[in-house]
Amino acid sequence: MPILNIQTGLAGTTGVSPSIAYIATNDTEAQILTTGYLNQSVQSGLASFSLPCMACVSTVASAGAQPDVGWYEISYTTTSGSPISAIWSLIPAASPGSVVLPTIANHIAIYTNVDGGLSEDAATAINGGNIQAGLSGTAGYLASFPNTPLKGSLEVKAVANSGNTITTISNGAMGQASVVSIPDPGATTANFILSASQIPTQSITSGNLQVDGGTIVSGISTGGQIGAFEAFPITATSGYMAMQAAINASGNFGTTIENSTAQGQSQTITIPNAGGTTADFVLAPAALVDGNLIKASGTIGLVADSGVTTSSVSSAITQLGQLQQVSVTLNTAAVIAAFATPQVLIPAVSGKVIIVHSANVYTASTGNTPFTTGVAPIIQYGVTAHGAGTIAVGAGLVTGDIEAAASQVRTIGAASSAVYTGITNAAVAFSCTTAYAAGTGTSITFTLVFEYITATV
């Protein structure tokens, strides 16, 4: 679509600056704004422009459309290098208060410069004060759309309040840039949980509440509120389990319930039926002796070691002198954990030394995945990690025993004749110098015959 006509130097305009040119085209505005658009006209002698020059140019939005007319500035530049070429172009002419056309109905106008130029749909529109949607009695909302079409929107919308009051949403003091996301509630309506609410019970009706860091606290340390946790079963009207703090008349002391640090399996601990409205747990403040009976210590639910062996009151358990036997089975997780957390086979007793007379190690691997990668398994005194304790039995337990592909039993005798020190009050445990891996379904059972002797070494 060519330039149809160019008129310059009209009568009576000689010496007028800026000069005026008239250019008729069948091109779109985007085409006439192409750099070098006027080059061919100047080079062919069709036009000669006296700079500075303003041009009144007609364009069309599309073929066959009625022409649009606008003012543009004639631009003259040259290329760098050699030879130098002239570049004649049209550029939009801005004037104070000009409006960038076309505009779109119902879109907000924004200033494009300091001269009052107006346009719309800027990447960022700024107001130095507040922005208000709607009026009192006329609904309004703020809507934000993502850059992908047909993917919904986020609206901030007011609903009728119980009184003429204002609800303000504001940030707290932030130590970093933060993005706070509203999760999918899985329902058409949902509520935020607030630190203070007029609603007696704030509910999470689906999903779980998980605290990935920190502590869940019920009640306040300054008093005035009772802290409690309640758990209900899946069947309605079938009771519940509650954990509630009572007033400690002895002082400001906390009670912590925690699991064993040598737990070798998942476990469920059931509280039996007390048979009455109140009952106490039985607790042992000090270590108990394996094979001994326990006795009540006071009247508040404490027990202590009685010093009486079970063999002295029951013939069902045979104890040969001071010899005792223990059998401990470690599952896959416990065997793998034994590298960093040695697994206790015989518990320590204060003031005692454990003498192991024999050990049988049963590897139940047939039909399961054998262990791999472990090095130097050891039955040791103490719970020093990475198999760094003193060996408590005779030599014989090797890596292949734990990693055996077929089930087997390794028999091991007592420790060789030597001088041992530093083993009073020490447990006997299983560990290794390099961690085991794999072993799905495979278990290791340790059966040890041993005795406690009184010794301080």
Image (cartoon, grey):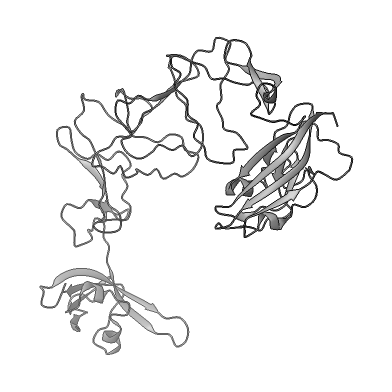
Give the quadrant of residue 139. top left
270 vs 347, left or right, is left
Q: Is residue 282 above or below residue 64?
A: above
Count of numbered badges drawn on the protein: 0
Residue under the image location 74 percent in, 41 percent down: 384
Q: Position of residue 392 (x, y in %)?
A: 78, 42
Q: Position of residue 404 (x, y in %)?
A: 65, 58
47 vs 386, left or right, is left
Q: Position of residue 345 (x, y in %)?
A: 68, 39
Seen from the viewer's position, the closer of residues 29 and 167 is 167
Considering every residue shown, the one lying at the far front of the view is 315
Seen from the viewer's position, the closer of residues 77 and 381 is 381
Q: Position of residue 99 (x, y in %)?
A: 22, 58
Give the quadrant of residue 103. bottom left
Seen from the viewer's position, the closer of residues 71 and 141 is 141
The reply to whether residue 363 is in sight is yes
Seen from the viewer's position, the closer of residues 18 and 412 is 412
